[in-house]
Image: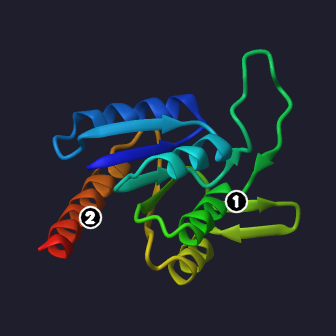
Amino acid sequence: MKVLVIEDDPNKATQVLNFLNELESISSVAHKRSYQSGLKELYDSEYNLVLLDMSLPTYDIRPGEDAYKFRHLAGHDILSEIKRKKKLARVIIVTQFERFGEGRQYISLKDLRMTLRLDFPESYVDTISYHPGRTTWKEELVKLIEKEKRNDKDSSS
C-alpha cells in the first residue's frame, strides 16, 4: 500500500511516519508539509491512502520565514480536489483538534465527520484523534488500514 502523509507538525509527522514504516502492509510512504505541496504530490503520483491533517499552511515554510497564510480547513479543500480530479486515493483525517475554522466560523469534529461523509463518500474513510502520549490513534489507524486493504482486495477480485 502506497501512503501519502500531509502533515505540518514535525513531532506528529515523525510519530506517524515512524509508525507507518513499521507496518508490513505499507510499501512506501511520502510526506508533504502543506496544502500546496500535498496537492501537487496528489496530482503527480497515485496513492492508495492519504493521511491528512485538517489544518495546514498554504505552502511549505522555508527556514527564516514566519509569515504564511494558514488554511484552517485545508483537509476539506484537498478532499474537494481529490473529488474534482477523480483521484482514487482514500483519505483518513488525523487531527489533534476538536474544532476547526476561525473567528465565528467554527465546526466541531463531530459535525466535520458528518460533512466529510456526505460530501466525499468515495474518498473519505474516517477521522482519527491523534494524541502524542497515547497509542489509541495507532490502534485506530491499523484497523482502518486493514479495512482498506480488505476493500482493495475485494474490489480487485
At x 21%, y 61%, the residue is 149
Q: Amino acid at mark 2?
A: Glu
In this image, 37 relative to 151: left or right? right
Can you give x and y, in whole percent of width and height, for residue 58 in the image?
Answer: 74, 44
- The foreground one among 85 and 145 is 85
The quarter of the rendered structure image containing the C terminus is bottom left
Q: Earlier in the sequence, mark 2 or mark 1?
A: 1
In this image, 145 relative to 134: left or right? left
Residue 148: mark? 2
Can you give x and y, in whole percent of width and height, for residue 63 in the image?
Answer: 73, 16
- Callout 2: 10 Å neighbours few (<14), some, many (20+)? some
Q: Amino acid at mark 1?
A: Leu
Vertical comparison of 34 with 97: above or below: above
At x 59%, y 36%, the residue is 33
Q: Which residue is mark 1?
A: 73
In this image, 150 relative to 67: left or right? left
Which of the 4 image quadrants contains residue 15? Answer: top left
Which SS class for mark 1?
A: loop
Residue 143 seen by the camera: yes
Q: Residue furthest left?
A: 157
Find the distance from the CA under tag 2 to the CA under tag 1: 24 Å
Can you give x and y, in whole percent of width and height, for residue 156 in the image?
Answer: 17, 71
- Callout 1: 10 Å neighbours few (<14), some, many (20+)? some
Can you give x and y, in whole percent of width and height, for residue 128 in the image?
Answer: 44, 58
Vertical comparison of 29 with 137: above or below: above
- The foreground one among 129 and 27 is 27
Which SS class for mark 2?
A: helix
Disc 2 + disc 1, Cβ < 8 Å:
no
Which of the 4 image quadrants contains residue 7? Answer: top right
